[in-house]
Image (cartoon, helix red, strand yellow):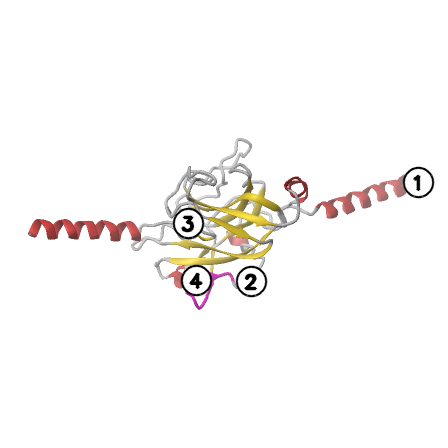
Amino acid sequence: MQKILLCTFLVMAVCLVTGALAHTRLVYPPPRTSANDLYTYPCGGVQFFGDGQPITTIAPGKLTVQFQGTLYPTENSHDGSPYRLALSIGGDDDYNKYVLLDHIPHATNDVVNKTSFNYSITVTIPDINCPKCSLAMFNVQTKSMGTCCSYPPSSTNTSTICQTAFHSCSNIVITGTKAVDTFKNSYYYSGPCGDYTYEETTYTKNSDGSLSLSTDGYVPPATQRCSNFKSVCKSSASTVFTFGAALIMMLMLALF
């Protein structure tokens, strides 16, 4: 009887520790798997549109994405670890091309209080007719690096690579109007970009207990930016064209 009680206690202890040491995953849209300790880019090795996985149909426009954030109970190893949300089309190869929101800061400890919680982050789903798309979230562990680092790994990137990141992906259908090729030729991301560092801010606590950024268009403060950080990652095609046309006009006027 004592052995049975001891075994039961050990099993419960393991479960409690495992839950306490959980990391992060998407909550909505529902992810391909409930695992929250996937280390491999981009989706932890979990198959794109695999059998039995949830699929969520989404209209273009504003979408509140929820993902889980969990801190260790005895240490702050997740502090300052930023997130990124991105899309891929027809597979898991395009997340670096179709970023939705980058440099999403970690919540400060005074808000989180070292417990499990959900982030509620609003993104804009683009107008695309995509029967098989995927939404990916990754969370880079910058505190352990002690320096700026880049992610995901790239053969063309000369920065130090972030050594640890957690990943989660959701299968989605987007009911937009633009054909895939049209979307690919016109999409651009205009939010913040660059290497990652220790990034955190105070969030607003919602009635359901989730956390939201108090303002849209959040940009990390100067103290939480790496040397290659940009507040606006890319200008629109129309802006680039207008600037180029103006420059040509100025040169022509100077010549004549």
The residue mark sitting in front, 2 or 4, is 4
Q: Label 4: state its secondary structure.
A: loop
Q: Choose the circle earlier in sequence order: 2 or 3.
A: 3
Q: Which mark is residue 215?
A: 2
Q: CA distance from mark 1 to mark 2?
A: 49 Å
What residue sits 45% from the left and 41% below the top?
43
Kindly indicate whether the residue at mark 4 contacts the one at mark 2 (C-beta within 8 angstroms): no
Q: Choose the circle earlier in sequence order: 1 or 2.
A: 2
Q: Label 1: state its secondary structure.
A: loop
**Residue 212 belongs to the span the image colors magenta:** yes
Q: Amino acid at mark 4?
A: Ser
Q: Which mark is residue 25?
A: 3
Mark 1 crowd level (few <14, some 14–19, many ≥20, 10 Å Cα):
few
Q: CA distance from mark 3 to mark 4?
A: 14 Å
Q: CA distance from mark 4 to mark 1?
A: 63 Å
Q: Amino acid at mark 3?
A: Arg
Q: Quadrant of residue 114?
A: bottom left
